[in-house]
Image (cartoon, rainbow, N blue to C red):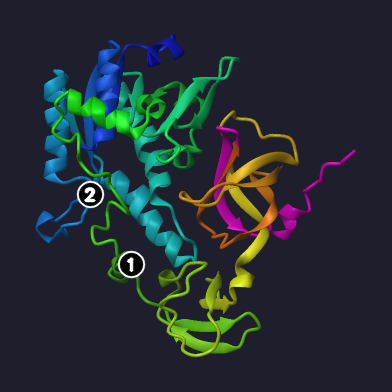
Amino acid sequence: MDIMDTNPARTNRVVVAMSGGVDSSVAALLLHQQGYEVIGVTMKLYDIDEADLPEYYRGCCTIDDVEDARAVCRILGVPHYVFNVQREFRAFVIDYFQREYETGRTPHPCIACNDKIKFSFLAQRAQLLDASHVATGHYARIEPDGSDGWTLRRGFDADKDQSYVLFGMRQDQLAATLLPVGHYPKSEIRRLASDAGFPNADKPDSQDICFIPTGDYREFLRQRIDEKPGEIVDATGNVLGEHDGIQYFTVGQRRGLGLSGGPPRFVIRLEPDTRRVVVGSEENLYHDTLYAAPVSWVSGEPPSPGTEVSVKIRYKFAEAPATVTPVGNGALVRFNEPQRAITPGQAAVFYQGDTVLGGGAIAGHEPQPAVAATIRQPVNG
């Protein structure tokens, strides 16, 4: 597929964010084949002690990752640079990650990284290289909307689709971004890499949280956040036990509660002001509404109240049918059927077919009273 045909107004020089993985490498390959002047950039996000990495580590930012990206650029005959963005990554991703857990929310660091690092900071650096566009290896598609704007769509490969983590992209960012691998299945991406002789053609995909090599986020937080003990209570306020800090819990959690006996219990709510972890039955986890704020609308304009959408409340979850009503800088979602473990801090992303309308961080099940008073339900019939 010729990506250039869908973006005739774009200039020829593009900075490709290259992690050392196969997806971003093939993104560079595809654009190079289509005549773009490609500049490969690997971002140094954080320091990592490679001697302590577990064998199963599938993150990024190792020396091998940089060398893989450099080798691909050498094969393509294009320049490769390493940008040190550790300060920005700590401020906008790691500090955000810690802050969210401290306040009883469950963050999604990949969304923060895309929003603040790849499509903001990297785009600024691209301008210094006289490149007006950036490209990544995300499995999603950017296409014209027919009226001088842009739409964000799912990737062709449904199993690899990453549109969920890109919902915050604005029109100006969409206009300055290329996502070439989103038009292909993963199997084809690996074949293209192999045919090109890339050393990372069979490299496993990265997994989990890249800056926590062991995958143990609780231990990561334990080393960085002072523990503030609190109570574990049931839905009526009866004290069942104690905990070391609300940062070690998330909605829907069953294991690690330190409670013995009785029926199965799940975390149904976290109360940061009182440092209480509220537990209940699995039935207590189901709700048919959520409020997200702030919400970003891809088109720049909110839809009409009561617009029918499908909503994804976690990256790996299937969407559920619902209606969405914009409320101030947020949105109230009403699901057709109750959904399990709607978790503050995670993203609610709104789709119509394969098009992303927008999304935002889940704030709770209902807006605050002052916000709720502004809601006007659509009149049916």
* Distance CA(mark 2)–CA(mark 1): 16 Å
Q: Residue sitting at 57 percent across and 46 percent down?
A: 319
**Residue 7 is at least partly visible in this image:** no
**Residue at 43% of width from left, 52% of height from top?**
108
Residue 142, visible in the rendered structure: yes
Residue sitting at the far left:
51
Circle 1 sits in a helix, a strand or a loop, which is it?
helix
Q: Residue at x 30, y 12 (%)?
A: 34
Q: Is residue 133 left or right of residue 241?
A: left
Q: Position of residue 76 (x, y in %)?
A: 16, 19
The dot on residue 188 is none
Q: Is 185 drawn above or below residue 3 in the view shown?
A: below
Tell me the crowding category of disc 2: few under 14, some 14 to 19, or many 20 or more residues within 10 angstroms, Cα based: some
Residue type at numbered disc 2: Tyr
Residue wearing tag 2:
46
| Percent of width and height locating residue 288 | 69, 58
Judge left or right: residue 309 versus residue 211.
Answer: right
Q: Is residue 106 above or below residue 194?
A: below
Magenta-highlighted residues: 352-381
Image mark for residue 221: 1
Q: Secondary structure at mark 2?
A: loop
Assign the C terminus to one quadrant of the image: top right
Q: Residue at x 62, y 43 (%)?
A: 310
Q: Which image quadrant: the N terminus?
A: top left
350 with respect to 83 (left or right): right
